[in-house]
Amino acid sequence: MSVATASPSLPAATPSAPAPAKPATLTLAKALNQALADAMTADERVVVFGEDVGELGGVFRVTDGLAARFGESRCFDTPLAEASILGTAIGMAMYGYRPVVEMQFDAFAYPAFEQLVSHLSKMRNRTRGALPMPIVIRIPYGGGIGGVEHHSDSSEAYIAHTPGIHVVTPATVEDAYWLLRSAIASPDPVVFFEPKRLYWSKAQLTLPVTTGPIGTAAIRRTGRDLTLIAYGQSVPVALESAQHAAELGYDLEVLDLRSLVPFDDATVLASVERTGRAIVVHEAAGFAGFGAEIAARVSERCFYRLEAPVLRVTGLDIPYPPPKLEHWHLPSVDRVLDAVERAMSA
Amino acid sequence: MSVATASPSLPAATPSAPAPAKPATLTLAKALNQALADAMTADERVVVFGEDVGELGGVFRVTDGLAARFGESRCFDTPLAEASILGTAIGMAMYGYRPVVEMQFDAFAYPAFEQLVSHLSKMRNRTRGALPMPIVIRIPYGGGIGGVEHHSDSSEAYIAHTPGIHVVTPATVEDAYWLLRSAIASPDPVVFFEPKRLYWSKAQLTLPVTTGPIGTAAIRRTGRDLTLIAYGQSVPVALESAQHAAELGYDLEVLDLRSLVPFDDATVLASVERTGRAIVVHEAAGFAGFGAEIAARVSERCFYRLEAPVLRVTGLDIPYPPPKLEHWHLPSVDRVLDAVERAMSA
Amino acid sequence: MTLLDLPLAATRGNPAAAASYWDTDPLRYLDEHGAPVEGGLRPAPDLLAGDRLLALYRALRLARAFDTEATALVMQGHLAVYPSSRGQEACQTAAALCLEPQDWLFPTYRDTAALAVRGIDPVEALTLLRGSWHCGYDSKRWRTAPQCTPLATQAPHAVGLALAAKMAGDPVVALCLLGDGATSEGDFHEACNSAAVYQAPVVFLVQNNQYAISVPLRKQTHALSLAGKGVGYGMPGVRVDGNDVIGLMHVLGEAMERARSGGGPTLIEAITYRIRPHTNADDANRYRDTSEVDLWLGRDPVDRLARYLTAIGHLDAGLDTAIGEEGAKYAAAMREELVREPEVDPADMFDHVFASPTPQLRAQRAMIEAEAAAVQRDGQQHDAAQGGQA
Amino acid sequence: MTLLDLPLAATRGNPAAAASYWDTDPLRYLDEHGAPVEGGLRPAPDLLAGDRLLALYRALRLARAFDTEATALVMQGHLAVYPSSRGQEACQTAAALCLEPQDWLFPTYRDTAALAVRGIDPVEALTLLRGSWHCGYDSKRWRTAPQCTPLATQAPHAVGLALAAKMAGDPVVALCLLGDGATSEGDFHEACNSAAVYQAPVVFLVQNNQYAISVPLRKQTHALSLAGKGVGYGMPGVRVDGNDVIGLMHVLGEAMERARSGGGPTLIEAITYRIRPHTNADDANRYRDTSEVDLWLGRDPVDRLARYLTAIGHLDAGLDTAIGEEGAKYAAAMREELVREPEVDPADMFDHVFASPTPQLRAQRAMIEAEAAAVQRDGQQHDAAQGGQA
Ligand SMILES: Cc1ncc(C[n+]2csc(CCOP(=O)(O)OP(=O)(O)O)c2C)c(N)n1
Ligand SMILES: Cc1ncc(C[n+]2csc(CCOP(=O)(O)OP(=O)(O)O)c2C)c(N)n1
Ligand SMILES: [Mg+2]
Ligand SMILES: [Mg+2]
């Protein structure tokens, strides 16, 4: 049966719910795996491919068991060529499939950059909607895992600056599941950044779960004095910082953006309007990083409310350092607290 | 004679001056051509290559006459493959050459993105200085020339966010000459964005000329009320806006950044400290664009001096539109003036 | 000799051979003068049937008429840019006519004539080059991807679509058009390689027109054949005369059939020539002699079929004139539409970025609408003022 | 038969042939049991001289000792990661020993043993994988590029360097190492193609170890030979037994010589096998049978030369033990250094980003220095406190 000639109805805005299951404690990686399996079950147009995603189950095991369960035509290894992985996904989407592709590590997505910028982001627009691109690119990103060169990049700013692509990144097990389901159900391309240092973090997950649509930030902790704005694996750093700050007498709010594009202005601006102070935390180099957009927006829109400059605690403006030096590069609780002190005494 | 075994002395920080010539009126494209010729004359390690740069002289004629004058080994056509153009340049630089490569249009530099991010920007650092990368990538960028899809992109934010690369862009004929000479003389990789709409703009050039080192902004117009911060082909827009604003009674300062990396904090911040207001103008999509970095920096560092939020007048967050619609996308004098009104009445 | 046994060109450079590159013998049915080649291709009888050949000829003339008119239109400022396919009409025609309705075509910026032959309205086909939108035809309805500008990037799309069709069990083949220069790009390689690994039903047709803008083929490859690249992918590689529409239809037909029946991809190199400059903006005198162009004008693909048809008694001056008039009518209709300023709507810029616009895009759309309304108001005031003066 | 006449594998898939891929006959001098092959390669006498062969054997043993020790070190946590080249020592050794001092080597993450054979101090060679810096040896002094991780991206660098040397008139050849998987990347294609166009003095040595992490060769290419890709570039392609160091030295020697004397690039495919998992972090049981590994253990490159040397009377048990002890000593010295925590300096992060740091980097450096000083202060206070307690 032809997929293309099957009624090409757009997917429901929300993914269909899997059968309720009993609560289970699982890792973020396993939650992603579950989301893939559930999405493949729910919609036969969903196919998963990339390097080593088949028999091996991916180097982080996020696709573990999918090839065995769904067959080689639903989950398969590709030749080693990232531009053609994404290009192939684009062609499959033109025919009505919903590909989910894996880039093995963040830096190994760069070869697909032209396909991403010149086609993935533009095809729907180019064809006035005739060829939508319901494609998810999964990219493990970020550092702190002792990876050698090219294994710890954070490239969200490159993608977020490219109109036509949604960019999301989970920080919790629940969001990992739900955001990935939502990304796969989305009629638009989504770059799904997976915080690799959190792959092994565990939490309880009870399905079905719904955490919030793409485009909405989550308030992870409420506070009155200052808003910490973070995403991905900087969220735990922000939360830990808030805990320490509480001991110092500062009551911090912590936002987990979850979605960089679309950006949840409403939640972010409302929070800063409440607190009057904001600090952005991310791992990528600070200069022209995504934090610049956040700081610029907040500084402009909350101009009359801000009691201190919006500060950024980010990676340094250097090539990602080797394992033995990476702790100097990564935004630390100490650096966040230092920024909190500066903002609170402004 | 081996270039590599020749004393691998680093180049002088400033390019050697060509013989003084009488003043001539020439286009920006011709000034670039002159800079290439003078650099090739001054240093035999300078080689120019890319698509159609040889016999044709480049689609914008910036390399016109170089192959004939310096021979096919100093200026040559490559196979049609941008990643290998840059990769070849990297290998030549490892051997002691100083390649200047052309990417035919901005969007056609994307295939070289992995080489740029994973090697060009990191090789010096990776080898603790043993393998510096004195390479210039010339990229015609920006819109407003009626180009069809992929011929009008502005990708400076992608590059500026990548540590290890200098990013410059001239707005005047003099800067075109001098910045290109400086870029070629630089011991570090420089992405040299050429504002293609200004290729045919003319001015008088008297050689030798020295306009200022890479990393310094230029004040194109002084003013007391507000600072317009622009670069490349947005500089003429800013200047025209300032003229109109004067008629409305506002005295605007206009900064031409020239160099996005290194960023001239001193000049920019001093200007805003004087005026108390700032508006950023660029053609690239605003979201997570380079203007975000400018706005974030200025908002943070001039926090106590700002009388109005820093505004951004930029391209829309859409794929670059077709020729018949591009005037809606580009930052116009009217939009800048509108922002000026808002800032002045804040 | 079947096509697949085609001996590959020598693998090492032979300057003398390289110089006469386009004189080495590709497969063909008709020679330059329109006579069947001895020992040449042997197409099936239905391809050689008189009305089939006449239909091919009509299509060739249509492609020529389209290209000629588009060239005139761009000179007069009615198109933003036009990359002509003059001299390549046999490829343009065969690429469109070898397809079944369910097959997909992946064209480049140079293949607008092929779109016209496929039946796409010329105004829709020229939308990109006119500058009013990026793609003017309904890709899904016409099973024709938007014309692709970033070189070779459409090749993996064709592979993906073909793989999808194969998975779905549909008898669909994807035909991917490329230029000689584009074969140097990494995407070409990755696409060919994965097509072969997946045994995807895709056919790559390289129109080797000897130039990538100003860069001649000898600076693009050291091999004597582009078809030889098939070896590295475990894929049949075929070199064919790109100005012989009968030979092309035969070779393409075999490849399409093989793909359709599960035999995997094929790489076809069609030897042809770009008669006009790269686009209207190019100055070909900078890099090639007109004598070279003259040589190839003598190998004209349209003439060639005309001579053959005349020789076998299927074409006479009367019919030829009639066909010419069909083309003239087509061109006139095309012109009538294209000399008009196209209507564009700025809202289009926002409505297709995503399935539903983000809040930020809604705000930007509102800003543009306000500006547009102001422009219109000013215009009306201006009109009113004018009216008052009259 | 010269190497260049090597018949190419059939271009279409033959499942039976594909299944026995590594059993088809590549060029070799010694067979699996260490006996010269009839009708095999005929290296020049100087390559077959006893002391030359013993030197090769010593290098093989060194490569093996290095790899074994590095594997042990990573298991014990003294390296961040280690991709073993066990089973590929003939390639590692030949890649280093076929070079003249002025030649450049472009290694990958898997080629650390080749660096050791080239003479680079093992601690410097392992700096990347130890995690203390990105490259620990002086690339310029050793004419050895930093080990490259993004697959195939080093290939255009090798072409560029070779082209530069050619332009400078220097007799320098660049040897670029690649894996089988890397041949699927666009950069591989672009590099091979431009190398041939420029006739650059570069040799591409593909160590076809049958896997790209978990992905077997048959999912990487539909062709029966990677060497066959040379056809598409107009470049000689040679397929050689990658576990026969004599055959490899001969084939590499020919290719290096051709490159050096202006004959252009060569593509060499060396058939070998990755005995260990991709890296210490990999679990190869997920995707291959140990029986396959056992088969290849029987084709060991070190053993093979030992048997031949023994047969021709150049090696006996005593000498073999002595050579083994050299290796053990090398490994012990390597261990002694590498079990120590390496010294790193955070200032290194800033000092080489640019020739001179930007004002922004100076500020960031100052911040880190302040932090480091604070840490040290805290440490000293802590030590002092400890001292007080003692
Ligand atoms: C990736 C990329 N690089 C560069 C260009 C600019 N460009 C447009 S057409 C062209 C030449 C293409 O030559 P060929 O593939 O032979 O096709 P032809 O134009 O001859 O039909 C070039 C370099 C492009 N469109 N895309
Ligand atoms: C561009 C890129 N994509 C993906 C990876 C991740 N990766 C590292 S090694 C490897 C397999 C490489 O296989 P092969 O080229 O055969 O070399 P081998 O490891 O077998 O020596 C992969 C996929 C990478 N390093 N670079
Ligand atoms: Mg061409
Ligand atoms: Mg391998």
Image (cartoon, coloured by chain):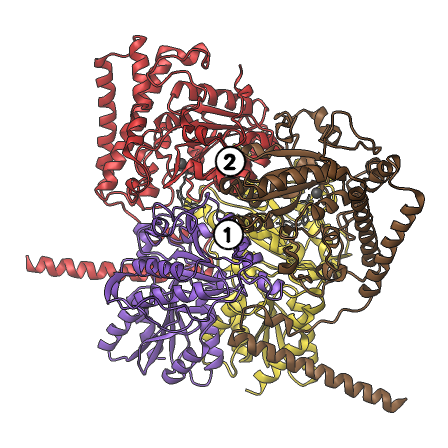
Chain colours: A purple, B yellow, C brown, D red
Please, which residue is most extreme toward the top here? D313
Please, which residue is most extreme toward the left here? D390
Q: Which residue is mark 2?
A: D158
Please determine whether, in this image, residue A66 is positioned above or below residue B286. above
State how far apart marks 2 and 1 are (Cα).
43 Å
| Relative horizontal placement of residue D77, taking residue B219 as reference (left or right) | left
> Is any part of residue B47 visible from this angle?
no
Find out whether the residues at labels 2 and 1 contact each other: C-beta distance under 8 Å.
no
Nearest the eye: C236 or A276? C236
The picture places residue C195, in percent across and down from the top left corner, at 53, 43
> For the point 32% across and 13% down, which residue is it?
D308
Amino acid, disc 2:
Ala
The picture places residue C184, in percent across and down from the top left corner, at 61, 41
> For the point 59% across and 32% down, which residue is it?
D233
Give the structural element (helix, strand or loop) at label 2: helix
Q: Which residue is mark 1?
A: C168
Quarter-of-image position of residue B106? bottom right
Q: Nearer the viewer, mark 2 or mark 1?
A: 1
Give me the chain letter of mark 1. Answer: C
Give the structural element (helix, strand or loop) at label 1: helix
Please determine whether, in this image, residue C255 is positioned above or below residue A208. above
